[in-house]
Image (spheres, rainbow, N blue to C red):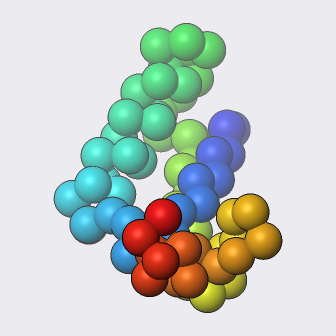
Amino acid sequence: MPYVNIRITRTEATAEQKAALIKGTTQLLVDVLGKNPQTTMVVIDEVDTDNWGIGGETVTARKKAGK
């Protein structure tokens, strides 16, 4: 029973995009590893940009600075 966890910032993806990620990730596991799609779990965690840091700055600060 595969479990895949995808983490993205909260403002990054629409509901349609997240559905496509779930479908595509499931299909990838079917194609590459022969996994059963009925027992494959994909979880998308959305992290607030204030709680995600890159290069010593929050994503919120980086976006405000145009980085």
Front residue of 40/66: it is: 66
Q: Could you tell me residue 67's position as x and y percent?
A: 48, 64
Position in image of residue 17 (x %, y %): 27, 54
Tell me what residue is drawn at x 68 percent, y 38 percent: 1
Q: Left or right: where does residue 45 sit relative to residue 56?
A: left
* Quarter-of-image position of residue 63: bottom left
Image quadrant of residue 55?
bottom right
| Residue furthest out toward the right | 56
Quick one: 23 or 48, which is closer to the camera?
Answer: 48
Q: Residue furthest front?
A: 65
Give the side of residue 10 with respect to residue 6, left or right. Answer: left
Residue 34 visible in the current orientation? yes
Q: In this view of the protein, which residue sits in the foreground, 62 or 49?
A: 62
* Vertical placement of residue 19 versus 48, above or below: above
Seen in the picture, residue 43 relative to 60 is either above or below; the reply is: above
- Residue at 46% in and 35% down: 26
Give me the residue at 70% from left, 76% from top.
Answer: 57
In this rendering, the count of numbered labels is 0
Residue 46 in view = no
| Residue 36 sits above or below residue 14 on the image | above
